[in-house]
Amino acid sequence: MPRDSTEVPEYIIIGGGTTGLVVAGRLAESGSSVCVIEAGKHIHDDDRVDIPGYFGKTLGDPQFDWSYTTVPQKYVLNRTDVVIPRGKALGGTSVINSMTWGRASKDEYDYIANLGNGIDWSWDNLLPYFERSETVIEPPSQEWATEHGATFDKTYHGNSGPLKRGFVPWLGESHVPFFKAMNNLGVPTNHDSCSGNNLGVFTLATSIDPDKATRVSSAVAYFEPNSHRINLIDQAHVQKILLERDERTGLQKAIGVEYERDGKIVSIGASKEVVISAGAYETPKILELSGIGDQQRLEKLGIQPKVHLPGVGENLQDHLLVPSSFEMKKGYVTGDYLSDPEYAANELALYKKNRQGQYTSIHSAFSCLPSSQLFSVTSRKTILETADRDQPSSISNSVLRPGQDTLHGAQKQWFKDARHGQVEFMHVPQFCTIKASKPKADKTPYLSLLSVVMHSFSRGSVHAASNNHRDHPIIDPSYLSNEADLLILVDSLRFARKLAETPPLSSMIVTPTDPSAKMIHDNEKLKQYIKENLESAHHPIGTASMMKKELGGETTLFRFRFA
């Protein structure tokens, strides 16, 4: 359908982002009529998006990034400068993200099913859809694959999907030493972390086409092959979902969408379903603008309540990240070299001509460790006691307590279980502690190790700021509101330092840069460093929770199904 079509689509997708386009593409392939409403525009043939090594150039750019901000973070020195980018384009954040691609553990998917969502959401039933999404490109050789922990187990991967996935050719000289140092600390190599077991040290495949060395966003994989089947309404801002009350059941049914484009308000109906896929920040805002949310909150904003659902916008979770950096010996080539204009120009020419060099790649070495490999028995006990003590302060609505107690109990079990990863360590061959200090000039190489809390005990919220659809939502991640997260990061940074001091990685390093050698052993100074340098890993979830309504979720209101 063209944009000005008078035909009523069967499905309207709100949000042409990473997931929305998957739904739209699959529905269109099945012969359904689909309309996608997207606030950004379709950006294609733009080096800032396409070239993998240009990752970061679009962050903060209003053409590509919504550049959301948080309210002052009470437990993080009242900071408001924690960057939380979201993609402002067709393809959403898959247009600006770092392109590494992983899966959670089997047990975590199974837990989604056990929350009352049904067996369809279990690992065994999701796996065929994972496989259907991808075409994996094998590594250049078996020797390379073994050395880099980079293998596709065909049991868990597809070879005919729209998303091309492979391993990048440039990984940096510290990539393999990172693996070997982890091995020397008792962390095994995991040759395929997408198999349902993501423990160990591994190389992640990326959403980069290995043949073209270009980013594969959901716009490239799902929209462009189906663009003739999908009615795209871009640069359009959704005001609300149009609801109609069923007189027989008393329930509200979504029958269409009202949006603003070029200053005009337009309503469009759907003959079957409205699918909202606007991300963890915009989805709750749009629901609230539509009259779905906590009744008192909506009335204060001048919005007529249609469905009282206090869980909307609550339960915000994110991965918490704190970097450490180390000065390396001269001569090692790292991403820091790209700050030299002449070197960068030569690398870009190499990329353009032969699809080789640093610009083909993104950091790809990761490790996911259970609590038993990171924390002493005493530390584990203290962390769990602190998590219990601070849980109430992480919940802003008492109605949500049953669901939060359920999730909290699961997290504690995972924390105790040696089969569940609690902290991820990312290897980045480049200076990353930009808030703590500045790198030396003259091509001084650096290695950064990023410590990431995978299951934060803290909970935040996202809500509409007003009844104006153009206003950004109020985002309060409430970072470190549960002090257990802070304690986890303290020990994680010390493990990162221990890793850097372990051969063969230690032989490449001159000295730690951030945190300093004195700071790493001082609890209070290290906690201050964490608060000053904490970042979001940009993986927000949970604000439209898939739980039963009595647990504070929304699955009794909304139908979730597979496209």
Image: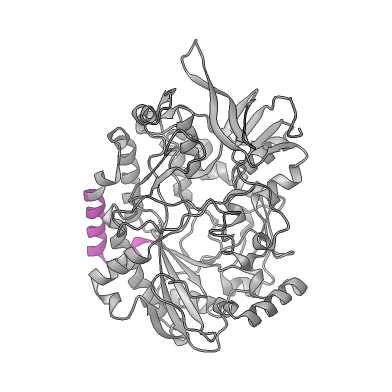
* Residue 304 falls in image quadrant: top left
Give coordinates of residue 308: x percent, y percent: 39, 25
Give coordinates of residue 475: x percent, y percent: 41, 46
- Up-down relation of residue 368 to residue 41 (above or below): below
Q: Residue at x 45, y 27 (%)?
A: 291
Q: Residue furthest bottom?
A: 330
Chain part drawn in magenta: 369-389
- Work out whether residue 106 or residue 229 is closer to the camera in this orientation and state it: 229
Q: Is residue 247 left or right of residue 74?
A: right
Q: Which quadrant, please, contains the C terminus? A: top right
Q: Is residue 516 left or right of residue 274?
A: left
Asked if one can make out residue 374 in the rendered structure from this viewpoint, the answer is no
Colour setting: one colour
Dominant SS of magenta comes to: helix
- Up-down relation of residue 535 to residue 325 (above or below): above
Asked if one can make out residue 160 in the rendered structure from this viewpoint, the answer is yes
- Up-down relation of residue 309 to residue 318 (above or below): above
Whether residue 387 appears in magenta in the rendering, the answer is yes
Give coordinates of residue 98: x percent, y percent: 56, 61
